[in-house]
Image (cartoon, helix red, strand yellow):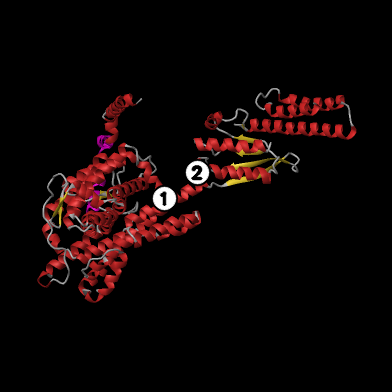
Amino acid sequence: MLDHWPRTTSKYLKREGRRFCSKETLLKRLPITTWLPKYDLECLEGDIVAGCAVGLTLIPQSMAYAAVAGLTPNYGLYSAFMGCLVYVIMGTCKEISIGPTAINALMTYEYSRSGGPEYAVLLCFLNGLIILAAAMCNLGFLINFISRPVICAFTSAAAITIASTQIKGLFGLSFKSNGILDTYVKIFQNIGDTRWQDLTLGLSTIVVLLLMKRLKDMKAAKVRAGDTLGTRMWKKVVFLVSIGRNAIVVIIGLVTAYLLDDHQPFIITGEVVPGLPAVRLPQFTAVVNGTTLSFGDILEDIGSGVAIIPILSILGTVAIANAFCGGKTLDAKQEMYALGFCNLLGSFVQSMPVTGSFSRTAVNATSGVKTTAGGIITSVLVMLALAFLTSHFKFIPKASLSAVIMCAVLFMVEYEMVAPIWRARRLDQLPLWVTFLACLFWKVEYGILVGVAVDLALLLYSSAIPKINVSTIKKEDGVKAAYVLVEPCTGLFFPSVDYVRAAVNKAGISTAEGSLTVVLDCCHLTGLDFTAVKGIEGLCSDFQKRQQPLILANASPNIKKSLACLDPHIKITSTPEELHSLLRCVSLRNEVTATCDQSAAVSARDGCSHNTQQQLCNGAQQQCSVCNGAQQQCRVCNGAQQHCRDLQR
């Protein structure tokens, strides 16, 4: 067998390679080939408006997120255009905007702060490779093991952490901190050094941003059917002002700082590297504190970030795509391919890790985007800013960027999810709060792992100790019990075998009083592993020792096949008719046994002749003739007939 393994593997790889390179697959992996032939002027108009709106949001956000990642603003802009361009070609959801996000920036800071930009760019490269590998190996299903409560808790804790790190910029303070508690301790220690100019600018910016956010939601700003052309244009301007609020407040702060440069009242960003980035491979070595680190040393330094960042990137993009796919079937694998190439190619232009942004995606959707070509307009705006405006970015006050970040993450705190989770399933509060507290007071990346571990523990607990319903089914007269029904509410696999076996035995002894028929409902059993098969075999043995009937009802063909290795006399039914017939046979067997016991009692009491006892037993055996048509069920009566013969002897 081992001799044939290389040949089999080679054939598999060749077959998969031919399938991947086929025309059908290539067209599927390049969704642009679907919508480009149908592109028209209406699509162009919608994409230009949406692309400009997203660009005005993305430029200030990307510079602000670069600060969160511990990088200079130009690296945020480097991360803002390549993802948009790649997604135009490979993306399936026209609303999604790919670029730097608050959570990815925070994760980049956690894993790259010791190595600076070289670590961040290499993280982007590795992020792309791992996402592509996960897509090729169909590993996207692993994301399903992160439950909604864990995602809510992680997002909320990350938002609070990010907002907390920006308070020092808002107050004009300068210090280094480690963790949210240390941040607040040092804020109070340095509160006396607060710069009132930065605080005033920052608070004013926050108020203006929140007010401008409400503009587009006002009834007066909504376009109506009877509006004139002038009114429509005015409302469109109001909409664009609301959407581009981040760019507007940053420009106002920049102009104010520029005009007051002789006596600069604000802490400004400082020099920003001008121009577009050079296209080159990421550096696989780095110099940190005068020591040259190899690729292996960098990987060891990054640690779990190699896995955490791809998981969060996939999770964010797929979740956003599901929210905006408009009821269409989402090709999650294609989204992973697109995201992987966005990061991989982005690393060649010195990008930090990128993923889908919910806020910018919402802007794209409300702006009326028609196709993913809106990303081209967004990318052009970012590249124009890099080419011509970077020399002026040095005047952007840090308080303005801090305000932009705080307003962006403010609405990421999903406090409104606590009550619905409580009403749906109270036990889900455990992973919710464990994840939230671990992310907030320990580390964000460890917090989500702890949350997943708690979720899996609850999942395994429910699998090992499933809910089992036990009920007594009455006969037609409604008085006497016909049988005891045992219904496991989940499948039967090795973690729950002993528990189910004990529960069925308990029902057989206590509820069925050791004699009544027990019916084990197998309707929820979709499959059995070997341990489960052996457990059922042991269960059947337990009932045989007590001479108590046990029937497996509603068994699927797979279950019957798995149990084929057991005793051939085991009683299994697939339909209600079969169950009813088998229960009747068991009932007849009990009547035969009772009649034979009666004949023995009469013989012992009255000294009746052997012929009298023979007549009684013959009458009892004759009742079994109703089973002659049912071959397997008739075996149930054989024991009773043998009992009669033993008594006669």
Let me know if residue 34 is in the magenta part. Answer: yes
Residue 435 falls in image quadrant: bottom left
Residue 395 drawn at (x, y percent):
14, 64
Let me know if residue 629 is in the magenta part. Answer: no
Residue 4 falls in image quadrant: top left
| Residue found farthest to the front | 649
Residue 397 drawn at (x, y percent):
18, 65
Q: Is residue 75 left or right of residue 600?
A: left
Q: Is residue 384 left or right of residue 213?
A: left
The answer to whether residue 91 is seen in the rendering is no
Mark 1 belongs to which amino acid? Ser
Give the Cα distance between marks 2 and 1. 22 Å
Magenta range is 30-55
Q: Who comes first in sequence, dot 2 or dot 1? A: 1
Q: Residues within 10 Å of mark 2 (few under 14, many from 20)?
A: some
Image quadrant where one finds the N terminus:
top left
Give the main secondary structure of the magenta stretch.
helix
Q: Which residue is mark 2?
A: 495
Residue 452 drawn at (x, y percent):
40, 51
Numbered badge on residue 147:
1
